Amino acid sequence: MTSVYNDLDRPPLNEHSLQRALMVPGGFVSALRVLPEIDSTNTALLAAAVDGAPHGSVIVAEEQTSGRGRLGRTWTAPARSGLFLSILVRPKVPQDRLGWLPLLAGVAAQSAVHRVAELDVSLKWPNDLIVPGEDKGAGYGAGRKLGGILCQRGPGERASAEKPDEEGSEKFESDKFGADKPLADKPLADKPLADKPLADKPLAEGEAVPDTDGVAETATVVVGIGLNVTLRTDELPAPHATSIALAGGSVTDRDTLLRALLRDFGSCYASWVAADGDPERSGLAAAYRTACSTLGTPVRAEMPGGGEVSGRAEAIDPAGRLVVVADDGGRMPIGAGDVVHLR
């Protein structure tokens, strides 16, 4: 019989222990579930948001079968070999500052891994976590990828009142979710959900959530974070990937890392919201500039619709976009796309 304890280097997370530690008065986490297997934590939490999941809800999966990364990339890893989680937030900040949320998540993850695992971690714009090492020509500069972040936008307060189409759907409250352990005081999703998530469009860095009828809505955003913790060399999904264990991290206990990550995220988020989303006043912009290894580096920015621009990454603008000074001297703000570090 297969058991989660067959691999003693990868013990399962203890949901009740995490809840007791993180779901505390005045804390950021309002609800937390640890699921043995799921297709995507982002998809599940977007669905739960439609049914009323509270701000600060967290879903952690021991294994993802259809994890997603930025730009449509997939994210795969053996069970219990990493941290695969999604965080639901409903920020009440000016919409033109919402593009800083993916960068905020990167700062929180970088801070937690650096402090707990004692690794030299930096951020490749916008929020890939990298550590020193040969990147095998993948464009991470002198580094290998440790983790990544994908933010996806859900419906606003007004849109969340709409009921999804029930045809061809499945219940969120299925056996794999454990219907006897709801995400909040009552089951958040006892209604059938649409075959497709209602709002799975990735939030582009620097992109603002538009107003509806001239009235700004409270944004609903799911922040997905994937972090390689104990992957072995033969398990790496790509030549330029690595894990905390392979990079020589001093701590590989997923419980410790998860607690630190969520607490750092909550602290960064609280400061950002308290400053009305102002990245300078909250200290977020300064923290990001310190952590970002892309700044000052020769880069090639590959745009989603095709085309590219080469130059030096010079700054982060007020909307969270990367400013590249092109070879011809022009300044180009990059809000979405893939940035390759050049040697």
Image (tube, grey):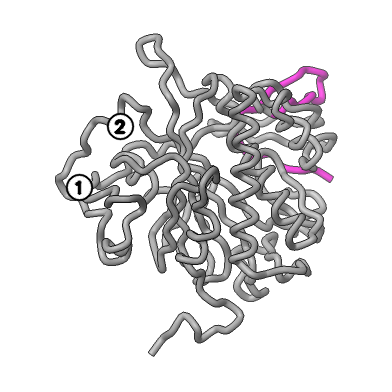
On the image, the x and y values in percent for residue 161 come to 26, 30
Estimate the spatial distance between the alpha carbons at disc 2 and disc 1, rounded to whole Å.
14 Å
Other residues around mark 2 within 10 Å, as few (<14) / some (14–19) / many (≥20):
some
Q: What residue range appears in magenta? A: 322-343
Quadrant in the rendering for residue 271: top right
Residue at the spot 68% in from the left edge and 21% down from the top edge: 318
On the image, the x and y values in percent for residue 320 come to 66, 27
Task: Judge whether residue 329 is colored magenta.
Answer: yes
Query: Label 2's element?
Result: helix
Q: Is residue 140 left or right of residue 171?
A: right
In the rendered image, the vertical position of residue 244 relative to residue 261, given as above or below: below
Q: The N terminus appears in which quarter of the rendering? A: bottom left
Amino acid at the residue labelled 2: Ser
Task: Judge whether residue 47 is colored magenta.
Answer: no
Q: Is residue 172 left or right of residue 257?
A: left
On the image, the x and y values in percent for residue 297 come to 83, 38
Other residues around mark 1 within 10 Å, as few (<14) / some (14–19) / many (≥20):
some
- Mark seen at residue 160: 2
Q: Which residue in the rendered view is the most extreme toward the left?
A: 167
In the rendered image, the vertical position of residue 44 relative to residue 313, given as above or below: below
- Mark seen at residue 59: none
In the rendered image, the vertical position of residue 32 relative to residue 14, given as above or below: above
Identify the mark nearer the N-term, 2 or 1: 2
Residue at the spot 31% in from the left edge and 38% down from the top edge: 198
Q: Which residue is mark 1?
A: 191
Query: Label 1's element?
Result: loop
Q: Which residue in the rendered view is the most extreme toward the front?
A: 25
Amino acid at the residue labelled 1: Lys
Residue at the spot 64% in from the left edge and 41% down from the top edge: 267
**Callouts 2 and 1 close, C-beta under 8 Å:** no
- Relative depth, front residue between 228 and 34: 34
